[in-house]
């Protein structure tokens, strides 16, 4: 990961940006921060000033427009530099490029969603399959019981009916276990 240091004066103009990009010098941070991320960053920074907190409780992650790579993810650790009266004179921000981690998190979330969808599809398939097999099998069991109850069956026919009933019950047990 590429690290950098950014120094932002009290007017919001960057006076130093190493090594992220020298083109930041003399520009304001929101020129390079993703529009969707700027309001949250701005609120954190304003809260730091209001509450006289020199650093946020955790790194701030946001998208940053890189000169050659487009939007990248940075994790910043801004610190307020105060004068002897407690007035903000500048910000110092230590930055780390966390684009690779963010990409890995995105890919993991996609894989997790795909796995969850596959599990749901499998469960739905098995429920449907179970129903589709159970319905005719229940009919076979019922019919074999009716035929088996007929006292006019010969011993050979009764044996076949008993085999159908046993096989049907075994099959329904297998389906129930699926």
Image: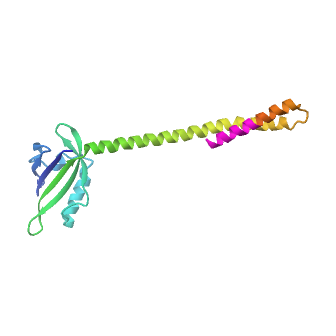
Indicate the quadrant where residue 110 lies.
Answer: top left
Q: Closer to the camera, 87 or 143?
A: 143
Indicate the quadrant where residue 1 lies.
Answer: top left
Q: Is residue 169 magenta?
A: yes
User: How many callouts does the rendering have?
Assistant: 0
Left of 129 or right of it: where is 72? left
Quarter holding the C terminus is: top right
Prevailing secondary structure class for the magenta stretch in the rendered image: helix
Report the residue at 11% width, 66% height from top.
87
Measuring from the top left, give residue 97's x and y in whole percent. 21, 46
Q: Closer to the camera, 52 or 106?
A: 106
Report the residue at 80% width, 31% height from top.
160
- On screen, 110 above or below 76? above
Indicate the quadrant where residue 64 lies.
Answer: top left
Report the residue at 20% width, 55% height from top.
77
Q: Is residue 163 magenta?
A: no
Measuring from the top left, give residue 70's x and y in whole percent. 21, 38
- On screen, 6 above or below 80? above
Q: Closer to the camera, 163 or 5?
A: 163
Colouring method of the image: rainbow
The residue segment tinted magenta is: 166-178
Measuring from the top left, give residue 7's x and y in whole percent. 11, 53
Left of 24 or right of it: where is 144? right
Q: Residue furthest bottom?
A: 85
Measuring from the top left, give residue 137's x and y in whole percent. 71, 36
Report the residue at 13% width, 51% height from top.
6
């Amino acid at each position: 990961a590429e690290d950098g240091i950014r120094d932002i004066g009290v007017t919001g103009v960057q006076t130093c940006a190493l090594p992220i990009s020298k083109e930041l010098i003399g520009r304001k941070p929101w020129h390079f921060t993703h529009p969707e991320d700027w309001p949250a960053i701005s609120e954190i920074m304003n809260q730091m000033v209001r509450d006289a907190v020199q650093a946020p409780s955790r790194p701030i992650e946001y998208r940053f427009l890189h000169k050659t790579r487009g939007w990248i993810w940075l994790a910043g650790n801004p610190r307020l530099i105060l004068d002897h009266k407690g007035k903000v004179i500048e910000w110092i921000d230590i930055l780390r490029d966390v684009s690779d981690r963010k990409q890995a998190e995105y890919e993991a979330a996609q894989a997790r969603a795909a796995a969850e969808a596959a599990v749901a599809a499998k469960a739905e398939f098995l429920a449907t399959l179970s129903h589709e097999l159970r319905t005719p099998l229940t009919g076979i069991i019922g019919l074999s019981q009716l035929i088996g109850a007929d006292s006019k069956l010969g011993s050979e026919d009764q044996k076949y009916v008993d085999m159908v009933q046993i096989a049907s019950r075994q099959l329904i047990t297998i389906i129930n276990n699926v």
